[in-house]
Image: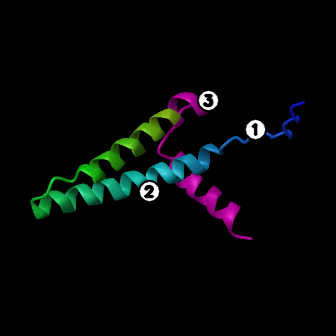
Amino acid sequence: MVAARPHIAHMTLDPDILIVAASLAVLLGVSGTIAGWADGARPRVAIGMLAVGVAVLAFVHVALLDDGLGLRAIPDAFIAVAAMILP
């Protein structure tokens, strides 16, 4: 007889956390890309990070937010995530 699996609640990720993580990935990707090109190297990882950040922001814009992602949503997301972390 096979034991029943314990009930695992489905966890959803807050769009604000995705916006903050993707924004930081885009910022690090842009700075790494510029630094790599300035050094004469090929910044493959930085361009990959930039692409992943942009893709996550596009996903949040299309799939998760009803009214889309505007420029005002990014600082609001940072404030909401800081409010989640700080007591």
Query: Which residue extends farthest left?
Result: 40
What is the tally of numbered marks visible in this picture? 3
Q: Nearer the viewer, residue 74 or 72?
A: 74
**Is label 3 or label 1 in front?**
1
- Give left or right: position of 18 versus 33: right
| Magenta highlight range | 60-87
Query: Is residue 26 rendered to the left or right of residue 66?
Result: left
- Measured as percent of width and height from the top left, residue 42 is found at 16, 53
Q: Is residue 69 above or below residue 17?
A: above
Secondary element type, mark 3:
loop
Q: Which of the 4 quarters of the picture holds residue 64?
A: top right
Q: Is residue 34 left or right of residue 81?
A: left
Kindly report the distance in space between the C-alpha atoms of the residues bearing marks 2 and 1: 26 Å
In front of the other: label 2 or label 1?
Answer: 1
| Circle 3 or circle 2, nearest the eye | 2
- Mark 3 / mark 1, whichever is N-terminal: 1
Q: Is residue 12 above or below residue 84?
A: above
Q: Is residue 60 left or right of residue 28?
A: right
- The amino acid sitting under disc 3 is Asp
Q: Which residue is mark 3?
A: 66
The residue identified by callout 2 is 24
At 59% from the left and 51% from the top, the residue drawn is 17
Give the image location of residue 84, x and y in percent.
70, 60
Front position in the image: 34 or 8 = 8
Q: Specify the amino acid type for callout 1.
A: His
